[in-house]
Image (cartoon, grey):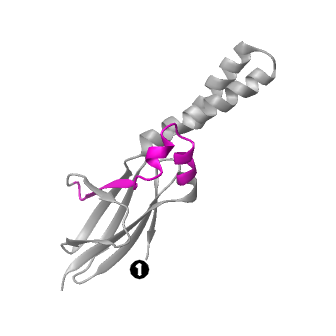
Amino acid sequence: MKTQVSILFKGDTLGSKFVKLCSLTWFIKIFKKPQIAISIDGQPMQKMTANKEAYVLDLVPGQHQISIIDLDAESKARTKRFTGSFIGFFIGLGTGSLSNGALLGKASGDLMEGKTIDQNNINIFLNDGDLIKISVKTAYNGSCKIKILQ
């Protein structure tokens, strides 16, 4: 029997879709399917695109580490920074001072930026003939939400 891992990459969460709509290039990003990079046991990264069907990978029995990265994490961080700067700038202008607007815009942008890349690691032990099912969704902050379905 084969030892396998089944990865169902569903795509974006609702918050992640909202971050795409707030970006300057939303008209391109909204139709682009999200991508993740997966590395199993330190092997080179493989790109995966959101799909309705699961990706099935054969593995040898034993201990495995699966690393997952959202490839759109940098863009999401820039969008959050821009949005924070924009909102802070107009709040500062509401106080009647252009310098307040500039200062609040920079502070708000720095506050909203957060992490740029969040790598998620899963450690699993598989016996001969095991099939483990994993569900992955990209989140608004550049991380991946992972559920083990089995």
On the image, the x and y values in percent for residue 65 come to: 30, 61
All told, the count of numbered labels is 1
What's the amino acid at mark 1?
Answer: Gln
Towards the viewer: 64 or 74: 74
On the rendered structure, is 75 left or right of 90? left
**Residue 117 shows in the view:** no
Towards the viewer: 138 or 33: 33
Q: Can you identify the residue that label 1 sits on?
A: 150
**Residue shown at the point (51%, 36%) measured from the top left:** 24
Q: Quadrant of residue 149?
A: bottom left
Residue 33 magenta-drawn? Answer: yes
**Residue 138 shows in the view:** yes
**Residue shown at the point (53%, 50%) measured from the top left:** 140
Q: Which residues are magenta?
A: 17-42
**Residue shown at the point (72%, 14%) measured from the top left:** 98
On the image, the x and y values in percent for residue 37 come to: 31, 53
- Quadrant (top left/top right/bottom left/bottom right) for the C terminus: bottom left
Q: Quadrant of residue 62?
A: bottom left
- Quadrant (top left/top right/bottom left/bottom right) for the N terminus: bottom left
On the image, the x and y values in percent for residue 15 come to: 58, 54
Numbered disc 1: secondary structure: loop
On the rendered structure, is 106 left or right of 127? right
